[in-house]
């Protein structure tokens, strides 16, 4: 049964390659302008398609028939890391797109890999065939030893390079998630969680491929693992294609406007860092006190905290206080971010509703939506962070006699 499945691997590889090339063309043509992150996504899909093509040449036996095609596509694999990193970076900050000289350095390794493999490319056809069949008969000459050394270096450098860009991509997403809390009261729709899932899937694949390249799987596992990793690769492509299309459709303009007019160096967190950042600010302690009073009136008197779409920008428009001054007042005086500041008002109102009993008792989910939360899970997490209890536990505690 398993052997029958494995025999279909070339067909699966062709399916993945075709999908990659089609989506690469689509994303490239559909890019709205030269600064669209989709350009990087198109490049990533194209190179990912080349990995399927390289694997197909191997599993179909074409490499044995025409040994000179072996390894020709490998240098392009060094583009995978930079392309997915730039795509994620520009999705998280549309103003980051500048293909300047500082970015060109990320594309040096493909050139270096060509130089490292140049000796291997000049190997005689018969010698390449013996390497592919595992005979490993190496002539005692410097030229052949140099070629083998080049291959080994490429096999070591490639997984390390991809690991570096996976880590950098994770860091970009974490920074983005932290910054969201300075601008939005609800962040579920803004978090780009699908990119985290993508990076997780790619990280699992990286572990499998790195182990195979650097150590190698036992012979009786090798074909099975290759087949299932191919299936996962195809799954990654379909996942990325669907999410890439869907994300741009619902959030493309939003990503352009999301942080418009906001300083990129806004302090993250609170405490001493925020105070040092605002040390030269023109706002006095009395100014901050007046701002907080006006914010409290708007949020409690006008019940703005009930608005699930409330943002720093909309609060600024309502109060006619600049976003910078609102942020400074919250960060410096209350030592919290906008997200936690608004949730404090929501939790306070929720606690009042949860204390009701009898006929006035309201379901927890209804309370969550009424005070501005989009989901029960987010409400539970925020409530527990502020009170140390879940809403249900808090209600039970209030209902029980002392």
Image (cartoon, rainbow, N blue to C red):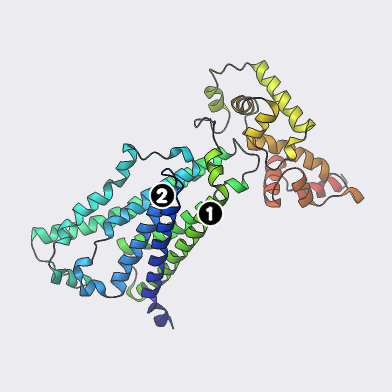
Crowd tier of the residue under label 2, counting other residues whose Cα lies within 10 Å: few below 14, some 14–19, many 20 or above: many
Q: Is residue 269 visible?
A: yes
123 vs 65: above or below: above
Give the farthest residue toward the left.
141
Q: Earlier in the sequence, mark 1 or mark 2?
A: 2
Residue found 41% across the figure and 82% down from its top: 4
Indicate the secondary structure of the residue bearing disc 2.
helix
Indicate the secondary structure of the residue bearing disc 1.
helix
Q: Position of residue 323 (x, y in %)?
A: 61, 28
Q: Position of residue 130 (x, y in %)?
A: 17, 72
Residue in front for this viewpoint, 16 or 380: 16
Crowd tier of the residue under label 1, counting other residues whose Cα lies within 10 Å: few below 14, some 14–19, many 20 or above: some
Q: Nearer the viewer, mark 1 or mark 2?
A: 2
Which residue is disc 2 drawn over? 39
Residue found 53% across the figure and 27% down from its top: 273
Q: Is residue 171 visible?
A: no
206 vs 135: above or below: above
User: For this view, does 373 lie left or right of residue 201?
Assistant: right
Residues marked 1 and 2 touching at CB (< 8 Å): no
172 vs 65: above or below: above
Q: Quadrant of residue 75?
A: bottom left
Residue in front for this viewpoint, 166 or 335: 166
Which residue is disc 1 drawn over? 194
Question: Real-space Cα distance between discs 1 and 2?
Answer: 19 Å
Residue found 44% across the figure and 66% down from its top: 234
User: For this view, does 30 lie left or right of residue 309?
Assistant: left
> What label sits on residue 277 in the rendered view?
none
């Amino acid at each position: 049964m398993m052997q029958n499945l494995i025999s279909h691997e070339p067909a699966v590889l062709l399916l993945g390659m075709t999908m990659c090339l089609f989506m690469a063309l689509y994303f490239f043509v559909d890019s709205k302008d030269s600064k669209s992150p989709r350009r990087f996504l198109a490049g990533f899909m194209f190179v990912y398609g080349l990995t399927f093509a390289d694997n197909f040449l191997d599993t179909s036996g074409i490499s044995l028939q025409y040994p000179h095609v072996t390894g020709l596509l490998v240098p392009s694999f060094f583009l995978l890391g930079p392309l997915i990193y730039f795509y994620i970076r520009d999705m998280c900050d549309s103003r980051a797109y500048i293909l300047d000289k500082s970015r060109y350095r990320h594309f040096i390794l493909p050139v270096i890999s060509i130089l490292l493999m140049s000796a291997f490319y000049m190997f005689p056809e018969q010698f390449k065939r013996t390497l592919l069949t595992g005979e490993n008969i190496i002539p005692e000459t410097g030229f052949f030893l140099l070629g083998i050394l080049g291959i080994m270096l490429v096999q070591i450098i490639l997984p390390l390079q991809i690991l570096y860009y996976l880590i950098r991509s994770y860091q970009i997403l974490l920074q983005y998630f932290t910054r969201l809390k300075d601008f939005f009261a609800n962040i579920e729709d803004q978090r780009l969680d699908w990119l985290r899932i993508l990076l997780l899937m790619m990280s699992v694949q990286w572990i499998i491929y790195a182990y195979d390249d650097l150590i190698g799987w036992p012979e009786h596992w090798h074909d099975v693992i290759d087949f299932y990793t191919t299936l996962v690769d195809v799954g990654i492509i379909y996942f990325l294609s669907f999410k890439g299309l869907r994300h741009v459709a619902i959030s493309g303009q939003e990503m352009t406007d999301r942080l418009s007019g906001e300083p990129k160096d806004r302090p993250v967190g609170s405490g001493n860092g925020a105070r040092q950042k605002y040390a030269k600010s023109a706002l006095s302690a009395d100014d901050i006190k007046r701002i907080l009073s006006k914010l409290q009136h708007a949020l409690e008197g006008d019940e703005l905290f009930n608005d699930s779409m409330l943002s720093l920008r909309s609060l600024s428009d309502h109060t006619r206080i600049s976003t910078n001054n609102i942020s400074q007042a919250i960060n410096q005086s209350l030592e919290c971010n906008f997200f936690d500041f608004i949730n404090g008002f929501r939790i306070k109102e929720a606690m009042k509703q949860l204390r009701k009993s009898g006929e006035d008792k309201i379901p927890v989910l209804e309370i969550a939506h009424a005070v501005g939360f989009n989901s029960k899970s987010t409400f539970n997490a925020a409530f527990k962070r502020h009170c140390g209890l879940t809403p249900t536990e808090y209600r039970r505690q209030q209902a029980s006699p002392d």
